[in-house]
Amino acid sequence: MKYILLFCGSDERWDTIPEAERNATYEQIGAWWGKGTAAGKIVGGEELQPARTATTVRFQGAETVVTDGPFIEAKESVGGYALVDVADLDEALELAKGWPARGVVEVRPLVEHSGGM
């Protein structure tokens, strides 16, 4: 079963962490990612640029509006994601519990369409 793990946190908090601590966290994330990939559990994912770099497309009736910035004002935003292929929710949660950067990990099942989308 496929799940997406959404890694959420504060861009401001991440920007204020001392460089040595940030680098150590990246090393821990690399180890977590490597272990999950080697086990065949993590099958994709990426880190995202900060929310301030987002561009949002809104559909308002017949009109389409493009604006700079994220779609909502929030203290936390999605900073990256991992696509995992595991047996069940319990296994996805075990992976999420090991996420070294702390913050919030939202675990959400994917809708798997037969024949793709």
Image (cartoon, helix red, strand yellow):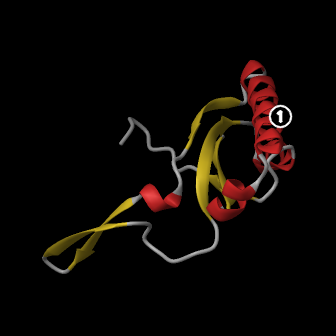
Q: In which quarter of the image is the C terminus?
A: top left
Query: Which residue is at a point 64% across and 68% down the rendered structure image?
Result: 76
Residue 67's place in the image compared with 54, above or below, is below
Residue 108 at what x, y percent from top left? 64, 55
For residue 8, say whether it is visible.
Answer: yes
Residue 107 at what x, y percent from top left? 70, 55
Residue 42's place in the image compared with 53, above or below, is above
Q: In which quarter of the image is residue 103?
A: bottom right
Q: Which of 82 and 41 is in front in this view?
A: 82
- Give the residue furthest to the left: 62
Residue 84's place in the image compared with 111, above or below, is above
For residue 105, say whether it is visible.
Answer: no
Provide the residue designation for mark 1.
28
Residue 100 at what x, y percent from top left? 83, 44
Q: In which quarter of the image is the N terminus?
A: top right
Query: Which residue is at a point 43% across and 39% down the rendered structure image?
Result: 114
- Give the residue furthest to the bottom: 61
Query: Which residue is at a point 70% across and 55% down the rendered structure image?
Result: 14
Q: Which of 91 and 34 is in front in this view?
A: 34
Q: What element carries label 1?
A: helix
Dot 1, how many residues are within 10 Å of its Cα: few (below 14), some (14-19), or many (20+)? Answer: some
Q: Which amino acid does label 1 sit on?
A: Gln
Question: How many numbered dots are placed on residues in this image?
Answer: 1
Q: Which of 3 and 56 is in front in this view?
A: 56
